[in-house]
Amino acid sequence: MNKPGDILKKFRLLRNFNQTVLSKGIISRPAYSKIENNWQEPNYEILTALLARLNYEITDFWRELNRDNVVDQCYKLFLKGLEGDLTEQEARNLIQVLEDSKFLSNRHYHLYGMTKSYLHNSFPSIISSLEDSDKEYFRTYINSLKNSYSLYDLKIIGDFATHVLPYSEIKKLYNRLPEFSPYDYAEDTQLYRTQIHKIYNNICDIAVLENDLELASELLVKHKKFAKVHSDLRYLLYIQINEAMILFKKSGNICDLDKLKEVAKIFNQIGDIKTSEAVLYQYNSYVGEDTYKPDSAITHDF
């Protein structure tokens, strides 16, 4: 793994700064020299100030710090698998490394769970689907959370809560979640906003399925408010799906589901055929052309 001092030195040399210019007004040059030589680590305030002077974001620093670690290498293979370019040997290597390291941190177990969820269908004889023990791990962890949530906590909630918790526990989880401000995390919002979109959308979808239209409507209002600040095409389309479903459930008018066909067409036009087919499946299941199976519906599908 790269060390903080090595990364700062690399960034400093790329910007043609000497140590005196970089550290001036932030930290003494001798103290900075100790950081760059990895004799001590900078606190967050000093690190962000140094990076700002170098015109780098904290995300640039973390990306460089994690460039050569096991999770980063596994994540690259995971993405390769999503694209359909992963070989069988790479799939074996990937799941073996994740099996061996899954308990090291949330980041490891999250990627382990995502790999089994997304790549099982491509490599059924190599990568198993989520087992009951995996689901129980996520369920226990999610139910233990309260008051303070890290970004990785939000990732686990967004990606797994609606798959591993019964509805009664999903409602309890929702009631103890904080109010998610669209202005949190300032510029470094990508991971945060994606997970909040997922949390609002997936819980709303489950509430619709459970005919809990009061909670579904409440979530839809919050999701729309969040999306005004953090607009995202995929989740704007999901909002339209949930809005149409709530309207249909309240009115019983099948015409209220026509929006799903429009949304499916948009997903098809942007090349997301899988999601387009899932939306059409959801439409057909409600108009009586298919038997509804939750695991095949849009936000239940990994």
Image: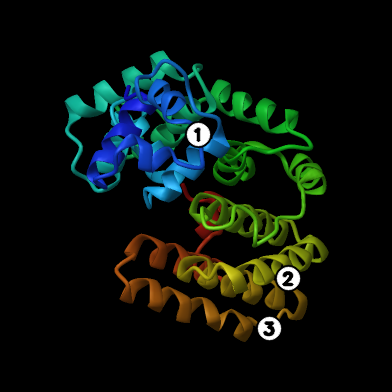
At 37% across and 44% down in the image, what residue appears?
Answer: 60
To which residue does mark 2 refer? 221
Q: Secondary structure at mark 3?
A: loop
Distance CA(mark 3)–CA(mark 2): 22 Å
Earlier in the chain: of badge 1 and badge 2, it is 1
Farthest residue to the bottom: give it.
Answer: 255
* Residue 61 drawn at (x, y percent): 39, 39
Q: Residues within 10 Å of mark 3 (few under 14, many from 20)?
A: few
What colour scheme was applied to this rendering of the protein?
A: rainbow
**Residue 174, numbered circle:** none
- Please determine whether, in this image, residue 62 is positioned above or below residue 282: above
**Seen in the image, is 292 located left or right of residue 216?**
left
* Residue 237 drawn at (x, y percent): 51, 72
* Residue 2 drawn at (x, y percent): 32, 25
Distance CA(mark 1)–CA(mark 2): 47 Å
- Please determine whether, in this image, residue 64 is positioned above or below residue 184: above
Q: Amino acid at mark 3?
A: Asn
Is residue 286 visible in the rendered structure shown here?
no
Earlier in the chain: of badge 3 and badge 2, it is 2
- Do tag 1 and tag 2 residues touch (Cβ < 8 Å)? no
At 47% across and 76% down in the image, what residue appears?
Answer: 263
Q: Amino acid at mark 2?
A: Val
Between disc 3 and disc 2, the foreground one is: 2
Is residue 62 visible in the rendered structure shown here?
yes
**Seen in the image, is 66 located left or right of residue 136?**
left
Earlier in the chain: of badge 1 and badge 3, it is 1
**Front residue of this view, candidates 274 and 224:** 224
- Please determine whether, in this image, residue 196 is positioned above or below residue 243: above
Between disc 1 and disc 2, the foreground one is: 1
To which residue does mark 1 refer? 27
To which residue does mark 3 refer? 253
Distance CA(mark 1)–CA(mark 3): 67 Å
